[in-house]
Amino acid sequence: MPDAPTITEVHIARLAELAREQREDDDRTCVEWVTESGETVKGFGLLRIPEVGVVRCTMEAGMVFQVHVHEFCSEWLVVYSGALEVTLWENGLEVFPVAVGEAFKVWPGQRHRVLALQETGIIGVTIPCEEGYPLGPHHSGQAVGVPGQDSGGACGPREAAQPQ
């Protein structure tokens, strides 16, 4: 099982508080992703610097982020409400539940998909910040801070990467 980051209930409570403070009508921080079934998940960028990208989103029960890979970045999924299931294709197929107050780390290059088991609030973090995370074409596999590779972007539909 991948390493679990050390995150306390205080950290989770503060992240949830920050997430609720984000205005949902602020198009400057809005991004949308298309799920496996064609539904839209709306997210909001909380932080974007070359060292780290942070996004908040809420997935409805049954929504699935398609299989994808972050080639150059680690990704943490922190659940502040609801529950997820993360599937990895590393040593065969492995499925990991992630509950409120828990975080899951996906290492660079790991194929994974995310399923919301119920309506779920998530803080997603990439280190270093991945191009488009959180405000451009998501899951591009490029790190920011490289001239000519950071596309940025405003609110609008984003296609998730196709399975490898």
Image (cartoon, rainbow, N blue to C red):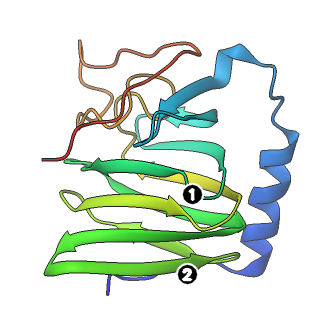
Helix, strand or loop at mark 2: loop
- In the image, residue 66 sits, relative to residue 92, either above or below, namely above
Query: Residue 127: x, y in percent?
Result: 39, 51
Instruction: Give residue 79's quadrant in the image.
Output: bottom right
Query: Residue 47's x, y, as percent?
Result: 60, 37
Do tag 1 and tag 2 residues touch (Cβ < 8 Å)? no
- Viewer-nearest residue: 37 or 101: 37
Q: Could you say which quadrant of the image residue 105 lies in?
A: bottom left
Could you say which is closer to the camera, residue 135 or residue 95?
Answer: 95
From the image, tell me which residue sits under label 2.
6
- 122 sits left or right of 19 in the view: left
Q: For the residue labelled by badge 1, is the local secondary structure a helix, a strand or a loop?
A: loop
Q: Residue at x 79, y 75 (%)?
A: 10
Provide the residue designation for mark 1: 62
Q: Residue at x 43, y 48 (%)?
A: 65
Q: Is residue 62 left or right of residue 127?
A: right
Residue 8 position, x and y percent, is: 69, 80
Residue 29 screen position, x and y as percent: 65, 23
Q: Amino acid at mark 2?
A: Thr
Q: Residues within 10 Å of mark 2 (few under 14, many from 20)?
A: few
Give the amino acid at mark 1: Gly
